[in-house]
Amino acid sequence: MMFKSTRDSSLRLSASEVITQGISEEGGLFVPESFPKVENLSKWAELDYLSLAKELLALYLTDFSKEEIAGCVDRAYDKSRFGGKEPVSFAYVSEGRDDEKCFLELWHGPTCAFKDMALQLLPQLLTTAIKKSGQNKTALILVSTSGDTGKAALEGFRDVDGVKLISFYPKDGVSKMQWMQMATQAGNNLRVCAVEGNFDDTQTTMKKIFIDSEIKKLAAENNMMFSSANSINFGRLLPQIIYYFYSYFELYNKGRLKSLKEEINFVVPTGNFGNILAGFYAKMMGLPIKKLICASNKNNVLTDFINSGSYDSNREFFLTSSPSMDILVSSNLERLLYHLSAENTEAVKGWMKSLAVEGIYNTDMDTAKRVQQLFYGGFCDEAATLESIDSLFNVEGYLSDTHTAVAASVYKRYLEETGDSSKAVIVSTASPYKFPDSVLEALGQPVPENPFRQMEALEACTATKIPARLKDLENKKIRFEDCVSKPEMADYVKRYIHSWGEED
Ligand SMILES: *Cc1c(COP(=O)(O)O)cnc(C)c1O
């Protein structure tokens, strides 16, 4: 399997080159030259999570040996990191009834959010890929985070040999708990820094740093090379394909599907379009998926895009109770556009240029139609998010976080609008304890000032348990208090290239 760029079809790179490099030099994203097909689903349906992961990864990582892939997967999804029998869990609500709902819980990893699914595996893939390339360089990872990625990347790369990491986050754009998780991070190979601005500002500036030739030269002089842990790295996308297959087989093995041809829907709370894009990849590989339901919060740029074919980021940016979805520029959409426009790199380049310059682009009719065949777009506002948490808990007995609640709310609307009776999996992306203030408010409970008291209050009123990893944060020291303006981000990176360069 070789990879191309969404903006240059003449490129041919191997999987390890793609994972090491992160983003293509001309600014495009790496994409596989074709979708490997998964046939004979009944055999795949018997595999446990780790075995399934190894088989699926092997289809894309053709320059990795079987042993290398197995080593990466076993280390990433070790029980000590995820607990439980398998790294993911399923929760059935209204079980056995017509309106049964299946939640796929992706938050049983070290940071209690779905980013762990990819960010525990990526460091393994990256360090293996760098070794394979024969380069004896230190990988310098820059992360821009709307909250959950930062912590998950910090945890995944903490004290990994041959890697340094800087995580930028929007100063006022993360929850208190997310901030505590990052500010107290352990590890000697990393920095955490706030940026004045919102997530899009942070991400856009970071992308410029990536392709800044002066900074790249400085990194090279210090025996470092840039790499990315953001969801633009193909190594982030790949691990996310696995749980779409695994959930489908779970429903089948539980007797919920008549055959391995029956199509199901997935409902995905969406921000950067990475998670749901992996669902699209799974479908292209042969998994029977009917609709990918793209759920947004009040920042509903994707809903409008799916409904109109026009992507317009020129709109008010809202801070919501589901901060990991507070995004107006969804980077991974570029990959979808590439695939759905019949790999038209010229068109993609034009749209992305228009987005960068004008903040808006209009796709052609054919591409827009294909998007609508595959995706349903919906959003819900803040009141509906809280209402969704309340009814999920008080009517159906399921405690959900704010992001998952957005998905459940959009799914309800989808059912009302379409009457589609296909089975569905609602992707649950964070522990409710990561957003205890909003969840308490939704349940009509008093909200204490301190986030740790909030978690205790939530524990008391729902008879669920605070994850130990969040509870333990209270006794940890704040290690990182840096804060820069957008234009200062580049200097911050340079400063650490110098200081880390001198260590070696
Ligand atoms: C990152 C994140 C999302 C959005 O996922 P994308 O891949 O960016 O679309 C949703 N929920 C939570 C809790 C997240 O951390």
Image (spheres, grey):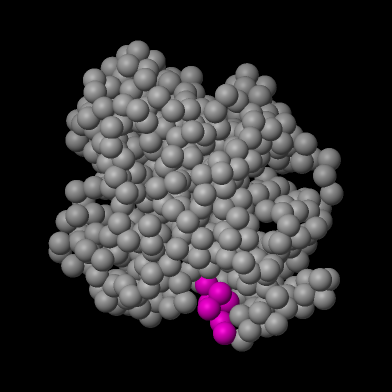
Q: Quadrant of the N terminus?
A: bottom left
**Count of numbered marks:** 0
Name the foreground residue: 226 vs 170.
226
Quarter assignment of residue 285? top left
**In the image, 372: left or right of 130?**
left
How far across and how far down the image is residue 186, in percent?
Answer: 78, 51
Placement of 31 over or under 58, stated as above or below = below
Q: What residue appears at the point 55 percent right and 32 percent down from the top-left corner?
A: 87
Quarter assignment of residue 332? bottom left
Residue sitting at the far bottom: 214
Residue 497 visible at all = yes
Q: What residue appears at the point 28 percent right and 37 percent down from the top-left corner?
A: 39
Q: Which residues are magenta?
A: 207-213
Q: What residue appears at the point 57 percent right and 24 percent down from the top-left corner?
A: 85
- Magenta: main secondary structure equals helix
**In the image, 53: left or right of 190?**
left
Q: What residue appears at the point 61 percent right and 75 percent down from the top-left corner?
A: 486
Name the foreground residue: 138 vs 254.
138
Placement of 259 over or under 386, stated as above or below = above
Name the foreground residue: 205 vs 418.
205
Q: Quadrant of the C terminus?
A: bottom right
Residue 399 magenta: no
